């Protein structure tokens, strides 16, 4: 595999890559000039310079053109009024609002929650801070064996984000809301979340964020801690997003992440998860609906098993129509000694017409002999027999297709543990499909 | 509705398979009156199931000649859902499994879609639940089966009972039963037949397609048709079914040729 090759025969970036990287970096500056994060940012700068930003021929970017995500200026993105209440509005939560990447105190709740400390990255400027042990640290661990330069770029230049430290069971979710009000906003946010032993937190994210959004989230889940992440990515048709989640899991901990995406010309969601404590569980899932030739959605997941008796699940479903493209790159790496690993991965697409494309690269790499790992990837058209059956009962053709669409995505939505959240997203999905029918 | 009025009227219906350019129905004439049960029997490949699919509006068939009307309206021009709203119901020989769609959701969507198409008010969820439970109970369909995805993991008998439940909920004008007895043991056949008989009504016509006479012991037909090679070759009373049971189709076929 060339990703591994590129590590073993490390050479200097090509001239073209260096030029492109320098052009992008010229538009940026370090996200902080003093305080605890400076060394991490400087180290990240060196990483970006040595790796260079992604180029079209990179193996890891074979199915997704990096151009719009790496070019110096963010491509303009028109604002979109979805004419609906934002997701999670009915959920009791602590709201933290960023408008084009700028924190809005006015729209946010006080950053207070029992058992949870919440700070903003931009305001945490002291020389000593708990986040120092994680900021850029998990990102750097995630650079091997595959380079993720956009994440390093973010560590260097992120202007804000939240630092959340959870010591108990949070009584309600923390909710990050990303509004998009400028057609040219180019935003980098970096969050660090630390769940101490036995702690529990649900983190919600929603909104389009910016014309171009680069987000990194580093999550440390200590022994017996539980982290739930549910996100919807804003529906602005022209927005672009490159997001990374880096997670490290301790003994008997749980990490669950679910993402619902509809619209947005470009989305690359990477999740890099390391199971380092015995009996830990990591579940990552996503449901995506893509419509139109411009639409491109990429889920790239890398799960590393480095402990005994851990379980990981990847469940990704995409419904694509009118020339939309979906990508899934998913890997399970089982390190030597990670016995009794239970790894599962499924990626499926439902292609509603002959124009749409689904590209999948499922991978297993196993160095332990007592493991159960499986992966599957399918791509198929809608079941015409089922459509006829529904129509013969009086359901019109479009409603029948929508029922089948929701049924297809439901398996991914079922990965959300909290029933209220799951129902909320299911309702949202149903409403989107209904509105589409007009 | 006036008893004896023509519910379904099929004239000189010719149908071919689109893909194979193969003529399946070669001039079917049939009238089913409201309140009556018509049975169609015939050997394999005679075109019985094709007739049921063409009436329900399945794709893949081309009507090359003839017509079919329900209550005077041209069925062949309509989409399957329009036919359903007008009152056509086909109980499938092989009910389709739909993973991910709950049986209850499916039933409710169907009932309300038809009501909406007819300009009627949708059923409230409490009313719907009450009616479903009542009708399901008569068919020995438990709450668990209602919750499960449509037909997924159902036994052959459960699938057929589920078809009859849909029929009971949708209250169609014309019920077409396509080999509903296939795959049923004696007890299940009795249950299904009771469900069908409960729906017999002066305003409703039935077209029961079957290979065997045994179903007709439970669902007593008024008229029996014998179909062979894409045509109805003989029509008679219930005694015709017994004749087939005893002598097979060979004599009848020989008679015609």
Image (cartoon, coloured by chain):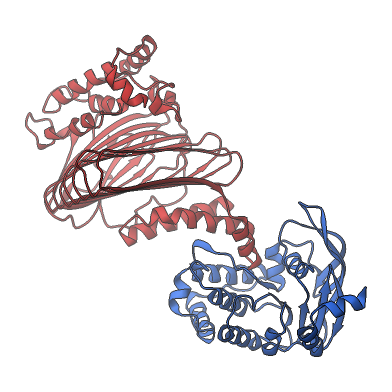
Chain colours: A red, B blue
Q: Quadrant of residue A164?
A: top left
Q: Is residue B164 above or below residue A60?
A: below
Q: Nearer the viewer, residue B245 or B218?
A: B245
Judged left or right of residue A52, residue B204 is right
Judged left or right of residue B175, residue A124 is left
Q: Nearer the viewer, residue A255 or A419?
A: A255
Marker count (numbered) = 0
> Which residue is located at x 35 percent, y 18 percent?
A24
Q: Quadrant of residue B188?
A: bottom right
Position in image of residue B173 (x %, y %):
71, 78
Q: Is residue B240 above or below residue A223?
A: below
> Which residue is located at x 82 percent, y 74 percent?
B227
Q: Nearer the viewer, residue A273 or B39?
A: B39
Position in image of residue B228 (x %, y %):
83, 72
Q: Is residue A274 above or below residue B110?
A: above
> Which residue is located at x 82 percent, y 88 percent?
B237
> Which residue is located at x 49 percent, y 46 percent?
A378
User: Which quadrant: the N terminus of chain A?
Assistant: top left
């Amino acid at each position: 595999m060339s990703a591994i090759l590129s590590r073993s025969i490390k050479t200097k970036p090509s001239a073209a890559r260096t030029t492109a990287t320098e052009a992008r970096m010229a538009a940026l500056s370090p996200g902080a000039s003093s305080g605890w994060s400076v060394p991490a940012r400087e180290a990240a700068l060196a990483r970006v310079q040595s790796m260079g930003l992604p180029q079209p021929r990179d193996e890891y970017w074979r199915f997704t053109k990096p151009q719009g995500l790496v070019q110096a200026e963010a491509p303009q993105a028109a604002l979109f009024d979805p004419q609906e209440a934002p997701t999670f509005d009915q959920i009791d939560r602590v709201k933290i609002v960023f408008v084009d990447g700028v924190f809005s105190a006015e729209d946010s709740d006080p950053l207070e929650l029992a058992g949870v400390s919440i700070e903003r990255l931009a305001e945490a400027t002291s020389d000593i801070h708990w986040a120092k042990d994680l900021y850029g640290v998990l990102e750097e661990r995630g650079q091997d064996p595959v380079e993720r330069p956009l994440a390093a770029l973010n560590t260097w230049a992120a202007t804000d984000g939240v630092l959340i430290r959870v010591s108990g069971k949070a009584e309600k979710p923390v909710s990050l809301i990303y509004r998009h009000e400028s057609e040219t906003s180019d935003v980098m946010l970096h969050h660090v979340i630390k769940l101490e032993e036995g702690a529990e937190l649900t983190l919600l994210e929603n909104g389009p964020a910016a014309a171009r959004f680069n987000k990194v989230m580093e999550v440390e889940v200590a022994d017996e801690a539980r982290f739930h992440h549910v996100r919807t990515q804003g529906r602005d048709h022209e927005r672009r997003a490159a997001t990374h989640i880096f997670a490290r899991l301790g003994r008997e901990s749980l990490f669950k992440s679910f993402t619902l995406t509809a619209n947005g010309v470009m989305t690359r969601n990477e999740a890099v998860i390391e199971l380092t404590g015995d009996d830990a569980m990591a579940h990552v899932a996503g449901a995506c609906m893509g419509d139109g030739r411009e639409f491109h959605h990429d889920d790239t997941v890398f799960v590393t098993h480095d402990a005994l008796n851990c379980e990981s699940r990847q469940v990704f479903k995409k419904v694509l129509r009118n020339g939309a493209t979906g990508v899934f790159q998913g890997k399970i790496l089982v390190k030597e000694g990670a016995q009794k690993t239970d790894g599962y991965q499924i990626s499926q697409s439902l292609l509603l017409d002959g124009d749409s494309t689904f590209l999948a690269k499922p991978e297993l790499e196993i160095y332990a002999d007592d493991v159960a790992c499986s992966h599957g990837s399918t791509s198929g058209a809608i079941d015409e027999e089922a459509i006829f059956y529904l129509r013969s009962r009086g359901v019109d053709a479009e409603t029948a297709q929508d029922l089948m669409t929701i049924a297809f995505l439901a398996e991914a939505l079922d990965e959300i543990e909290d029933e209220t959240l799951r129902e909320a997203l299911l309702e949202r999905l149903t409403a989107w499909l209904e509105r589409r029918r007009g | 509705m006036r008893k004896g009025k023509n519910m379904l009227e099929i004239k000189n219906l010719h149908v071919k398979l689109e893909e194979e350019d193969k003529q399946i129905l070669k001039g079917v004439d049939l009238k089913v009156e409201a309140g009556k049960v018509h049975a169609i029997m015939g050997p394999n490949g005679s075109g019985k199931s094709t007739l049921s699919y063409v009436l329900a509006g399945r794709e893949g068939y081309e009507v090359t000649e003839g017509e079919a009307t329900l209550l005077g309206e041209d069925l062949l021009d309509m989409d399957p859902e329009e036919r359903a709203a007008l009152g056509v119901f086909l109980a499938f020989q092989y009910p389709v499994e739909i993973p991910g769609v709950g049986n209850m959701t499916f039933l409710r969507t169907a009932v309300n879609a038809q009501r909406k198409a007819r300009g009627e008010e949708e059923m409230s969820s409490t009313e719907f639940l009450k009616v479903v439970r009542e009708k399901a109970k008569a068919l020995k369909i438990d709450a668990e089966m209602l919750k499960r995805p449509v037909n997924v993991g159902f036994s052959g008998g459960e699938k057929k009972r589920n078809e009859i439940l849909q029929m009971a909920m949708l209250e169609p004008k014309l019920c077409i039963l396509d080999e509903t007895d296939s795959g049923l043991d004696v007890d299940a056949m009795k249950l299904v037949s009771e469900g069908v008989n409960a729906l017999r009504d002066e305003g409703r016509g039935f077209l029961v397609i079957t290979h065997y006479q045994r179903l007709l012991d439970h669902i007593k037909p008024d008229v029996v048709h014998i179909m062979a090679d894409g045509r109805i070759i003989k029509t008679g009373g219930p005694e015709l079914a017994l004749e087939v049971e005893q002598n097979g189709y060979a004599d009848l076929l020989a008679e015609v040729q």
